[in-house]
Image (cartoon, helix red, strand yellow):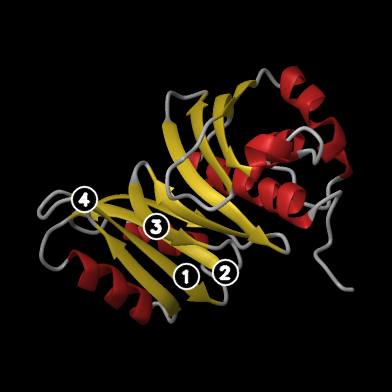
Amino acid sequence: MIGPVMIGPSSSHTAGAVRLGYVARKILEEEPVRAEIQLSGSFAQTYRGHGTDKALIAGILGFPPDDARIRDSLTHAAKRGLKWEFICENIPGAHPNTARITLAGAQGGGVTVQGASVGGGNILVDRLNGMAVHVTGRNNTLVVLHKDKPGAIAAVTNFMAYSGVNIGSFRLARPEKGGTAVMTIEVDGDIPDILAENLRILPNIIHVVLIRAV
């Protein structure tokens, strides 16, 4: 059997959990100092035995799924000043292997990311600060927070086309018309760092996060 290159014991409960923590860290875009992690379903029932707690903290620290430090991630987190709390509770309608990760950063930022480990080390992040997104971590991805104004989507996609970046998948979510919306754009191939920087200065764009494939 060929599976993901990882530190075990479980691809779903360990490798996938590392990826969930890593994506949350990337979206925060600063050093996390506090993590509140809600665990639902089988994550809540078996997280200590499968090392899910260590895996999530490892990802939040920026460790990849095959990093030997995962086994001692709680010790590394304490040395870096990260404080954490695990809360086991049911998240209605969520996948059995779901974590809702709320991070606070050293520079005052914060983010809440909800996602699931869906098997074989694969993940799906489906909520960002309460808004629907679709981040698998398999492809380089842009998460674009913007005002729900005419031309905002076209400005982003046209600039990407001009830059020679091909969109593999595109999803839009908006809690209400005319408010704040979010684009989730998975890309074929690489995304230059300068692309995300240039997108940030387009009209009606609030913030852009570039998540490298993990």
Residue 214 visible in the picture? no
x then y, percent, for residue 127? 41, 49
Image quadrant holding the N terminus, namely: bottom right
Q: Is residue 17 above or below residue 172?
A: above
2 or 4: tag closer to the N-terminus: 2
- Residue that numbered label 4 is attached to: 175
Asked whether the beta carbons under mark 2 and mark 1 sit within 8 Å of each other, the answer is yes
Q: Secondary structure at mark 4?
A: loop
Q: Amino acid at mark 1?
A: Glu
1 or 3: tag closer to the N-terminus: 3
Cα separation, mark 2 vs mark 4, equals 25 Å
* Of the two numbered discs 2 and 4 in the rendering, the one whose residue sits closer to the viewer: 4
Label 3 crowding class (10 Å Cα cut-off): few <14, some 14-19, many 20+?
many
Label 2 crowding class (10 Å Cα cut-off): few <14, some 14-19, many 20+?
some
Label 1 crowding class (10 Å Cα cut-off): few <14, some 14-19, many 20+?
many
Cα separation, mark 4 vs mark 3, equals 12 Å
x then y, percent, for residue 67? 84, 47
Q: Which mark is residue 207?
A: none
